[in-house]
Image (cartoon, coloured by chain):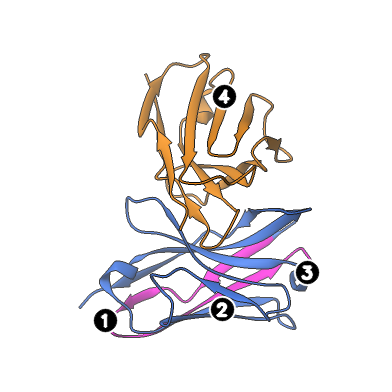
Chain colours: A orange, B blue
Amino acid sequence: DIQMTQSPFSLSASVGVRVTITCRASQSIRTYLNWYQQKPGRAPNLLIYAASSLQSGVPSRFSGSGSGTDFTLTISSLQPEDFATYYCQQSYSTPYTFGQGTKLEIK
Amino acid sequence: EVHLVESGGGLVQPGGSLRLSCAASGFTFSSYAMSWVRQAPGKGLEWVSGISGSGNSTYYADSVKGRFTVSRDNSKNTLSLQMNSLRAEDTAVYFCASVGRIQLWNYFDYWGQGTLVTVSS
């Protein structure tokens, strides 16, 4: 199985700052990498697919990059509604696997 | 508008069985693969199972293989997950999700609200 490792586990940041979350795969997954946002008590919401494609309706302050084993999710200017947990997920092969999540909290 | 609504969760004893359903609307159900993803209390997301649009191909996580069975009824726009030999570690919120696809890339684009399964004596 492909292991997905996110860093950091948690992050405290202020509104308006730029934030980067990283995700590393245990083997190359080319660009078969998706990012989701989840708020407490809610279902996950797709942000980025294919490593860098912005899902329809997602604000442009979210962006993704990377290929192979190393990927990043960047939020260019944090907004109050962005405080949530973020997950990466590989779709290269089954079993599809998620990272352990990065909890983004208000500083 | 796409809607996915799960049902069938509840409290079950270890070793017991439960059948989850997911009612889909707002899209051509038979054209899309579907998946089940679960989340144990306070934990991260775990992909459980997937099924092709036709239902001819199914996929499972090792943790549930041989105990869970995914199926679909395209005439009723319904996805199901039959869960047998349930264990305490199966306790989680179970989400159904549609699998969007662009060329070779796929992703979970729509999710239900989830249904809670609790395995406990």
Q: Is residue B5 highlighted in magenta?
A: yes
Q: Residues within 10 Å of mark 4 (few under 14, many from 20)?
A: many
Q: Quadrant of residue B13?
A: bottom left
* Residue at the spot of label 2: B80
> In the image, what residue occupies the spot 44% across and 16% down?
A14
Q: What secondary structure is found at the residue carrying circle 2?
A: strand
Q: Position of residue A91 (x, y in %)?
A: 60, 53
State which mark lies toward you, 1 or 4. Answer: 4
* Residue at the spot of label 4: A75
Quarter of the image for the N terminus of chain B: give it: bottom right
Q: Nearer the viewer, residue B120 or A53?
A: A53
The residue segment tinted magenta is: B3-28
Q: Residue furthest left?
A: B121
Sequence-wise first label, 2 or 1: 1
Sequence-wise first label, 1 or 3: 1
* Residue at the spot of label 3: B31
- Distance, label 1 to label 4, CA atoms, is 44 Å
Q: Nearer the viewer, residue B68 or A30?
A: A30
